[in-house]
Image (cartoon, rainbow, N blue to C red):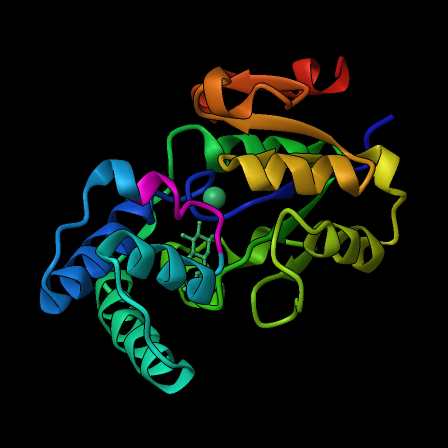
């Protein structure tokens, strides 16, 4: 049976990938190289510092740790400026309806995100009250594909991992779910998320009845 659903945030509940992209592109521009939308795909689900490492690799740059921290902070300040203007209209189609139905059916709901900005996004979009547990980048020490974020979520909910389903748009997130012993629903393309139990293009086409069949 299924007792809980654990949701990734960026790319599953809200479309924040575009804000991460604009902020990283702005940083690359300042550093003097281009950063494309295709490059941005490599950053999905990846932690802030690991994202910076990938960006610098694309630009062919090596920097020391202090310089890297300063750049990551700069990017984050821009990103926070963009997401501060978010509201409930930026919740992805079908996400809120699905979460409300889960709650009504007695299925627990948790967040499992790498972002240290998760609370700001949840508060601005009005999603905070729907979660029975919130695990974000301020609580974890290991990034996806490490299962920590989802294992902590199940623990905080008091449920067994094999009764949990994870919703993810990143390959590393699907791997984290599998390593946590959970089923997973990929939101995006079967090409990158093929290892999920099922792949959807959005939550709009999903129902609790289909969830219970997983
Ligand atoms: C993930 C995003 O959810 O959070 C990544 O998919 C991002 O793109 C990561 O780098 C960390 O986010 P933040 O807000 O802590 O920089
Ligand atoms: Mg994501």
Considering only vertical position in the picture, is 178 above or below 54? above
Figure quadrant of residue 64:
bottom left
Considering only vertical position in the picture, is 141 above or below 204? below
Which residues fall within the magenta stretch?
40-46
Residue 95 appears in view: yes
The residue that appears at 54% across and 24% down in the rendered structure is 193
The residue that appears at 75% across and 16% down in the rendered structure is 214
Majority SS type along the magenta span? loop
The residue that appears at 13% across and 51% down in the rendered structure is 34
Residue nearest the observer in this picture, 109 or 76? 76
Query: Magenta span has 44?
Result: yes
- Residue 2 location in percent, x, y? 82, 29
- Residue 35 location in percent, x, y? 19, 49
Residue nearest the observer in this picture, 57 or 9? 57
Residue 100 appears in view: no
Considering only vertical position in the picture, is 114 above or below 41? below
Residue nearest the observer in this picture, 54 or 144? 54
- Residue 55 location in percent, x, y? 30, 57
The residue that appears at 61% across and 31% down in the rendered structure is 101
């Amino acid at each position: 049976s299924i007792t809980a659903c654990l949701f990734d945030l960026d790319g599953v509940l809200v479309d924040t990938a575009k804000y991460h992209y604009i902020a990283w592109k702005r940083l690359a521009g300042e550093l003097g190289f281009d950063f494309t939308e295709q490059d941005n795909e490599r950053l999905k689900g990846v932690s802030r510092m690991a994202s910076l490492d990938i960006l610098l690799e694309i630009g062919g740059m090596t920097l020391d740790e202090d310089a890297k921290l300063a750049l990551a902070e700069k990017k984050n300040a821009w990103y926070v400026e963009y997401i501060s203007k978010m509201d409930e209209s930026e919740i992805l189609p079908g996400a809120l309806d699905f979460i409300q139905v889960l709650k009504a059916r007695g299925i627990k709901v948790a967040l499992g995100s790498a972002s240290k900005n998760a609370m700001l996004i949840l508060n601005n979009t009005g999603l905070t009250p729907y979660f029975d547990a919130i695990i974000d980048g301020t609580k974890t020490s290991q990034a996806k594909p490490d299962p920590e974020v989802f294992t902590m979520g199940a623990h905080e909910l008091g449920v067994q991992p094999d009764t949990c389903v994870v919703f993810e748009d990143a390959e590393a997130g699907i791997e984290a779910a599998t390593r946590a012993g959970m089923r997973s629903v990929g939101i995006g393309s079967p090409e990158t998320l093929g290892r999920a139990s099922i792949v959807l293009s959005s939550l709009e086409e999903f129902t609790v009845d289909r969830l219970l069949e997983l």
